[in-house]
Image (cartoon, rainbow, N blue to C red):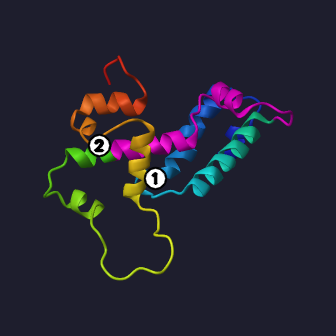
Amino acid sequence: MSSILTSKKVSLKLKGKVYVSWVRNCLDGGETWPIKATHESRLERTEMRMIRRMWGISERKTSKELRARLGIEMIGVVMRRNRLRWFGHLESMTKDDWVKRCTFMEVGGSRPRGRPKITWTNVIAAGMRSMNLTNIDAQDRQKWKRKIRGKTGQPG
């Protein structure tokens, strides 16, 4: 795979498509991770290193320019959208569904001193706040899809 991504004979658009389908697919299940900002920034840095290597450049170019030429979105944006998409699925499930019950289940027992660990629900709430979404929006599937994709007028 690295021979395709670093080859000078392969177009940048094709490299971008291969990267998204092969490398980003390893993040399947990322919508259920309660990711911290430090972890997200590590993923961003790692991704930019890979992108710069695919380009085969040593001169300075902006990250936006490199991503635009390859057709790749920032990994944090993709993960946020996937988490919200999964949350939309959960909201449409019935209260009796075992997946929904497990997702919002609280574990008993005492916790250690200090700041509480970040939870998936906290990450979802922050993502919803940043995109001006509510739980009620998730009830309308088409509206939810449009909003998490960032589209306002077109159907999902």
* Label 2 secondary element: helix
The residue under label 1 is 30
Please report the residue visible at 69 percent of the width from the left and 48 percent of the height from the top. Answer: 45
Q: Amino acid at mark 2?
A: Gly
| Local crowd size for mark 2, using a 10 Å CA cut-off: few (<14), some (14–19), many (≥20) | many
118 is higher (above) or lower (below) than 85: below
Q: Which residues are magenta?
A: 57-86
Among all residues in the image, which is located at the extreme right?
Answer: 59
CA gap, disc 1 to disc 2? 15 Å
Q: Position of residue 9 (x, y in %)?
A: 74, 28
Task: Looking at the picture, tell me which residue is in the foreground, 114 or 140.
Answer: 114
In the picture, residue 29 is in which quadrant? bottom left
Please report the residue visible at 42 percent of the width from the left and 36 percent of the height from the top. Answer: 131
- Mark 2 or mark 1, which is nearer the start of the sequence? 1
Q: Position of residue 46 (x, y in %)?
A: 68, 50
Q: Is residue 134 left or right of residue 148?
A: left
